[in-house]
Image (spheres, helix red, strand yellow):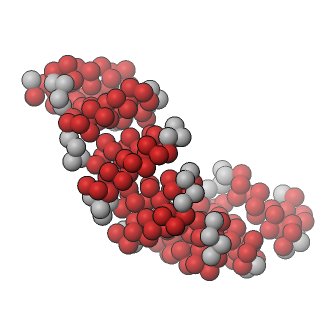
Amino acid sequence: DDSNANAFCLLGRIYGFGKPQNVEKSEEFFKKALESDQTYAKAHYFYAYLLRSRLQRFGEAEEHYKEAMKLRPEDVTSYNDCAIMLVRQNRSNEAKKLYEKVLELQPDHAIAHFNLANLLRKDLKDYKAAEKHFLVSIQKRPKFTAALNNYATMLHHQLKRYNEAEHYYLKALQIDSKYSRAHFNYANLCREHLKKYDFAQEHYLRAIMNDATNPNFYNNYGLLLQYALRKYRKAKK
């Protein structure tokens, strides 16, 4: 009955996403939840999430996402999560339709605008549409640092609007001074296009300080030292 399905679903979530995790037990409880009530949308959704994120069984995950969508067509979470999975399977046009469905239901959904903007930029190369969705995402969540950084990246690399890119990188870093990827991206902009080598050095070092494991940070800092600052011994290190 409903109470059994709810209890089994809760146990599935605890074992699947809590600590410590036990994915086999989690799947067992989600199956029991759906045996108790095949129409329990929440169990379909969380089982799909387990299948996608923990087990990489994407075909089965898609089936359960679709079932959750059918049972609760007003709930945007299943559309958004399924779209993320489709993007990773290079099914860009199908993912786009799901993000658009989210925005049809919730026009102010900042995450969906952000996800759709990333898809339009990276996969579909529709920079005009991507810009529109980045800007809406930022308008709805002004402190959304990933949106600020990714929009700046498009301005930097695709649209070649370097001063605007600088503005949005710095805005992201004002909000999160430890955002290593934004430090790195801004350093690249300073080195490659703005010729602000002192700023480039500062931000490469801050990127490295906040994430000492990324080899790209060291490599690009080395390029700055070698070709712009002519500090060959430091570059070698």
Q: Is residue 26 visible?
A: yes
Query: At 49% across and 45% down in the image, what residue appears?
Result: 92
In the image, residue 207 above or below residue 90: below
In the image, residue 137 above or below residue 80: below
Query: At 34% across and 32% down in the image, what residue appears?
Result: 48
The quarter of the picture where the N terminus appears is: top left
The answer to which quarter of the image holds residue 53 is top left
Q: Position of residue 116 (x, y in %)?
A: 44, 55
Q: Position of residue 117 (x, y in %)?
A: 47, 59
Query: At 29% across and 56% down in the image, what residue appears?
Result: 104
Q: How many marks?
A: 0
In the picture provided, is 52 more to the left or to the right than 150? left
In the image, residue 155 above or below residue 60: below
In the image, residue 162 above or below residue 181: below
Q: Position of residue 199 (x, y in %)?
A: 69, 77
Q: Position of residue 126 (x, y in %)?
A: 54, 60
Q: Is residue 10 visible?
A: no
Query: At 44% across and 55% down in the image, what residue appears?
Result: 115
The quarter of the picture where the C terminus appears is: bottom right
In the picture provided, is 64 more to the left or to the right than 156? left
In the picture provided, is 129 more to the left or to the right than 26? right
Of residues 183 and 164, the one drawn nearer to the viewer in this rendering: 164
Of residues 42 and 233, the one drawn nearer to the viewer in this rendering: 42
